Amino acid sequence: MKRLSIVLVSILIVVYLALSVFSSGEEYAAEKLFYKAMKTYSKIIANPDVAPPAMIASVEKDLKSLHKKYPKSAIAKTAHILIAEMSIANKKYDEAQATIKNIMDEYKDDLTILSMAQFMKGTIYEKTGRIDKALAEFRILRDKYPYTKLGLQIPLYIGRYYETKNDDGASQVAYKEAAAYYRKLEENNSKKVLGYMASTLLIQTYMNLKDFEAAGSALEATLINYASLASFNQLLPLVEIIYVDKLKSPERAIALYRKSETLIYKGNRIKELIDKRIATLEKPKK
């Protein structure tokens, strides 16, 4: 069940957006039923191997009841996705396929929901050992829903899949394809949120390839091209991981820190932190 963590993360985002616009009446009733199911579901996730069948059945019943009673509620989409997810987790693959088809028919205009459904199609094939079919579905997700959270992560996901199978040759090929994909995506969306997301995924891809020189170059370009407090907070920890830990070149970390400082207003808290890191790196080793 924990293997579907990417879907769960995305679902939480959808839940947040849905709950943020809840009003009264039908929406409140749907919300109440959903939280009842989620209270039990959280216990299942915590210990999936020992979850009693009756507990699982209870959650499925509540989710199906929610979708049937309140199909137009904001939370119904999330409930529908979770129904399919639970079917996959419990190896009810035919049921999951049927639910996924219903989801894709019902929510044709919701790219986030469609991307989740497409991911689960690939997951079913992956879990049943039909890897070629799984990869075909994942590539559809990548190409058809490139601007969704899942669509963006799929190139990396494929590389990691091969890595978990200790297939170094295939993982290297997949990661190189992912790097080319993210480079192109960033170039086509430079200075935009999507470009930034592609840049961060490119850094991670190079790190997975253990090409830390390329990772460092991508990191420097991202810090400069997408200079903001948010990007500095997210990316500055990678400076020492790449340049100090991996490349054994603290002077290059210091140089990048100093370059980053020029993009930060004086007096900013991050500047103070960078100054401390530079002072630490400049201290002679005993």
Image (spheres, helix red, strand yellow):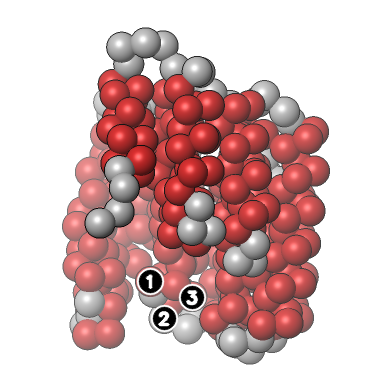
Say above or below: 276 vs 168: above
Circle 1 is placed at which residue position?
A: 2
**Quarter the N terminus occupies:** bottom left
Residue picked out by circle 2:
90
Q: Secondary structure at mark 3?
A: helix
Q: Residue at x 19, y 57 (%)?
A: 39
- Amino acid type, label 1: Lys
Q: Position of residue 157 (x, y in %)?
A: 60, 65
Q: CA distance from mark 2 to mark 3?
A: 5 Å
Q: As displayed, is residue 43 above or below residue 69?
A: below
- Mark 1 element type: helix
Specify the farthest residue to the top.
Answer: 266
The number of numbered badges drawn on the structure is: 3
Q: Are marks 2 and 3 in contact (CB under 8 Å)?
A: yes
Q: Nearer the viewer, residue 82 or 45?
A: 45
Amino acid at dot 2: Asn
Q: Tell me what residue is drawn at x 80 percent, y 43 percent.
A: 184
Query: What is the CA distance from the residue labelled 3 to the residue labelled 1?
Result: 11 Å
